[in-house]
Image (tube, grey):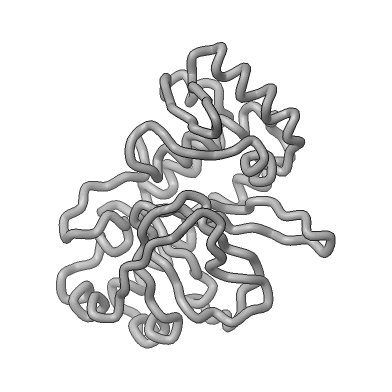
Amino acid sequence: MTLRSKPKNGFRNRLLNGLPPPALRRLRKHLKEVTLSRRDSLHEPGKPFRFVYFPETAMASLLTVLKDGTQTEVASIGREGMVGLPAFLGAKRSARRAICQMPGTAWRLSAAELVRQTHRGGPLSDLLHRYAQALFTQMAQLATCNRLHTIEQRCCCWLLMTHDRVEGDEFYVTHEFLSEMLGARRSGVTVIAGTLQRAGLISYTRGRVTILDRRGLEKAACECYAIVRREFDSLLRA
């Protein structure tokens, strides 16, 4: 029960993987495969959209940035989606920062070409409208989660969503980065990581997280993870 889907046309990205062959052929010649490094900037607040990204093995974070530089994650995007959805919806400039959270590959498309490919509707437009609903659900659920659930529950949810989007059971994340994504103190994240390790749910060594007991992690997480996952699975069936 993850956001992974079996490639049927050479793409891991769920949106590209879900396009019918004629629509994919029209789009494919405009796509460029790029390699993203951790913390690469994809979009910045107030800056025009130049490109959108369809992650394959990379994972991105959408961040709200305050005047004092404080930032917190409002959504994460992996192979199930596209970074730069507001460009499809008509926005010229980004309201949020988007950075690469987990290094890997993505397909890059110019924002102008995205508009040309979708302004008259069609399969890609239909998919992106459904994806928009799923992403908005994730953002709304995260707002509720941040208000009502414990840091430990939220941390478990974040680990599960990241696990869904990476290859295998291991990925790299520091306490500092995780605390920034959760909007929590680093000391609190350190305590939670220790608790999850002692429970046998994860192992954590020098920033390397290994998921040992996914079912146990799902039980420890709040209901938000399952709600968001069901929404994506329902709207993006491929």
Q: Assign the N terminus to one quadrant of the image.
A: top left
Residue drawn 48% across and 26% down?
218
Residue drawn 42% across and 20% down?
213
**Position in image of residue 110 (x %, y %):** 41, 81
User: Is residue 127 among the parts visible in the rendering?
Assistant: no
**Position in image of residue 174 (x %, y %):** 59, 38
- The residue most toward the right is 68
Q: Nearer the viewer, residue 126 or 206?
A: 206
**Position in image of residue 186 (x %, y %):** 73, 35
User: Is residue 200 among the parts visible in the rendering?
Assistant: yes
- Relative vertical location of residue 50 with respect to residue 40 in this rendering, above or below: below
Q: Assign the C terminus to one quadrant of the image.
A: bottom left
Residue drawn 62% across and 45% down?
142
Q: Nearer the viewer, residue 140 or 53?
A: 53
Drawn side of residue 225 relative to residue 17, left or right: right
Q: Nearer the viewer, residue 227 or 94?
A: 94
Residue drawn 59% across and 58% down?
62
